[in-house]
Image (tube, rainbow, N blue to C red):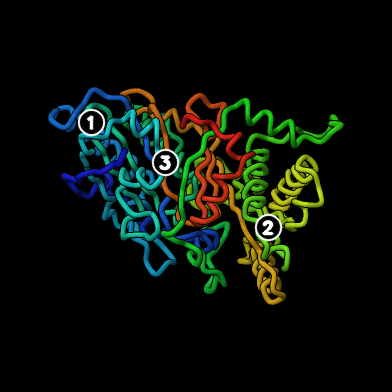
């Protein structure tokens, strides 16, 4: 089902009260400087009795969204400002983008949920994701002809990581429900902890592409449990935890991606796979930061594997080893490492960049696969006052070789948004083990 929308109104929403002059200058952090200048997308779908002709209900819904958005921006004031020189946000209350769109009459809410295509889901968003506009935040209210709405939002990744986006939405819907007094006020300390540098030595947008093919695959709880058991160390020691859902599914998707793309060229030259897992560093800092600390507060755990592991070990053996190395890479994101990041030096990122250059000079190849997870976050608690969402989605991804995990609504399965080059996606979708694992129903 092709999704088309017609935008019928655009306006700018400003904070309901002016930002104090003392808070007018919000400095970007070193980690912000290392973060892609793209948008983080989120689309919330709700079953509501409203259609294109119901102007009264549309206005009521829209006014509630706009009023609560204006109020919550007084707390999240950097989102209503403008980035200057990629070094700071001028918190001048110029506002965020807000639009209303009508979804084409042949497209039903149930059609989108039953057969979602990430590229089509982008139509519910106010901006293209690959390049930032002047706005740090945009919201689009989409009205379905035959009932239902979708609230699409884009938040600048230059200012906010995934957790900050989710906490922002949590605060926003609380304001809409009249529960502003229960909101934890965001803390803006990232630049104090990780001061910006004159030369970050890294272009975070170098691999941004519009050519990645993004698709969504669903893994049922029973399948995930079987994969966890497959990659569990045997005999299991009491001091060893089972692979988590994300560890196990990361390992499985990597193994099928690597196996399906391990072509003849790789047998003639060294191919090394790099697995990347962003880590929330708020609880790792000393003292730890609360979850409502706003900004980009993550660094990545890295693990590397030679392609030869695919042929010299059984799938269970390398599966367990991949899980072990993932944990080892994440464990390296500790306070000693973070102290160096606070000094403007990400030694792990610098090592990977130098290793890749050296490998390429020798005729080899470093192939990365990056995983990010929104699992266990309260996405389905986003109730504006008209009920919890029927479905929460991401959209097309902005890089090749990226996987984003989200919980299914029931909470026990996982939706995996995977972005690959077209030829690699074709190979993955013909891999027998991968096809056996995914659910036939989205």
Q: Earlier in the sequence, mark 3 or mark 1?
A: 1
Q: Earlier in the sequence, mark 1 or mark 2?
A: 1
Residue located beneath label 3 in the image: 168
- 338 or 154, which is in the foreground? 154
Q: CA distance from mark 2 to mark 3?
A: 35 Å
In this rendering, which labeled residue sits more in front, label 3 or label 1?
A: 1
User: Is residue 121 in sight in this rendering?
Assistant: yes
User: Is residue 334 in sight in this rendering?
Assistant: no
- In this view, 394 is above or below 338: above
Residue located beneath label 1 in the image: 61
- 306 or 147, which is in the foreground? 306
Q: Quadrant of residue 112?
A: top left
Residue located beneath label 2 in the image: 273
User: Mark 3 packing: few (<14 Cα in 10 Å), some, or many (20+)?
Assistant: many
Tell whether label 2 touches label 1 (CB within 8 Å). Answer: no
Disc sitting over residue 50 in the figure: none
At a point 23% along the width and 34% down the height, the residue shown is 106
At a point 64% along the width and 46% down the height, the residue shown is 256
Relative to 150, 183 lies left or right: right
- 140 or 275, which is in the foreground? 275
């Amino acid at each position: 089902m092709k999704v088309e929308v017609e935008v019928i109104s655009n306006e700018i929403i400003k904070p309901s009260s002016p930002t104090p002059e003392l808070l007018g200058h919000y400095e970007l952090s070193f980690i912000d400087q290392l973060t892609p200048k793209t948008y983080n997308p989120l689309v919330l779908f709700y079953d509501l009795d409203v259609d294109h002709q119901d102007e009264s209900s549309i206005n009521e819904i829209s006014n509630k969204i706009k009023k609560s958005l204006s109020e919550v921006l007084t707390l999240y004031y950097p989102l209503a400002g403008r980035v200057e020189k990629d070094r700071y946000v001028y918190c001048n209350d110029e506002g965020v983008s807000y639009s209303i769109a009508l979804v084409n009459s042949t497209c039903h809410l149930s059609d989108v949920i039953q057969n979602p295509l990430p590229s089509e889901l982008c139509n519910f968003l106010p901006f293209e994701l690959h390049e930032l506009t002047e706005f740090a935040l945009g919201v689009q209210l989409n009205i379905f002809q035959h009932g239902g709405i979708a609230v699409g939002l884009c938040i600048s990744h230059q200012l906010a990581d995934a957790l900050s986006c989710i906490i922002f939405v949590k605060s926003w819907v609380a304001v809409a429900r009249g529960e502003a007094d229960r909101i934890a006020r965001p803390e803006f300390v990232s630049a104090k902890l990780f001061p910006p540098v004159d030369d970050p030595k890294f272009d975070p947008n170098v691999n941004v592409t519009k050519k990645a093919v993004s698709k969504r695959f669903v893994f049922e709880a029973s399948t995930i449990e079987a994969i966890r058991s497959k990659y569990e160390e045997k005999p299991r020691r009491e001091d060893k935890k089972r692979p988590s859902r994300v560890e196990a599914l990361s390992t499985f998707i990597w193994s099928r991606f690597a196996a399906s793309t391990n072509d003849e060229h790789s047998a003639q030259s060294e191919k090394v796979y790099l697995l990347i897992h962003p880590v929330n560093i708020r609880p790792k800092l000393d003292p730890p930061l609360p979850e409502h600390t706003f900004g980009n507060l993550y660094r990545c755990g890295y693990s590397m594997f030679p392609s030869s592991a695919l042929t010299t070990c059984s799938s269970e053996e390398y599966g367990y080893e991949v899980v072990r190395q993932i944990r080892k890479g994440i464990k390296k994101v500790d306070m000693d490492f973070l102290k160096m990041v606070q000094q403007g030096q990400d030694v792990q990122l610098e090592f990977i960049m130098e290793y890749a250059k050296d490998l390429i000079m020798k005729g080899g190849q470093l192939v990365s696969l990056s995983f990010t997870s929104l699992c266990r976050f309260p996405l389905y608690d986003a109730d504006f006052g008209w009920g919890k969402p029927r479905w929460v989605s991401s959209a097309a991804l902005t890089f090749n070789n990226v996987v984003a995990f989200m919980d299914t609504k029931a909470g026990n399965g996982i939706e995996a948004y995977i972005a690959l080059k077209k030829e690699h996606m074709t190979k993955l979708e013909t891999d027998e083990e991968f096809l056996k694992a995914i659910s036939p129903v989205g």
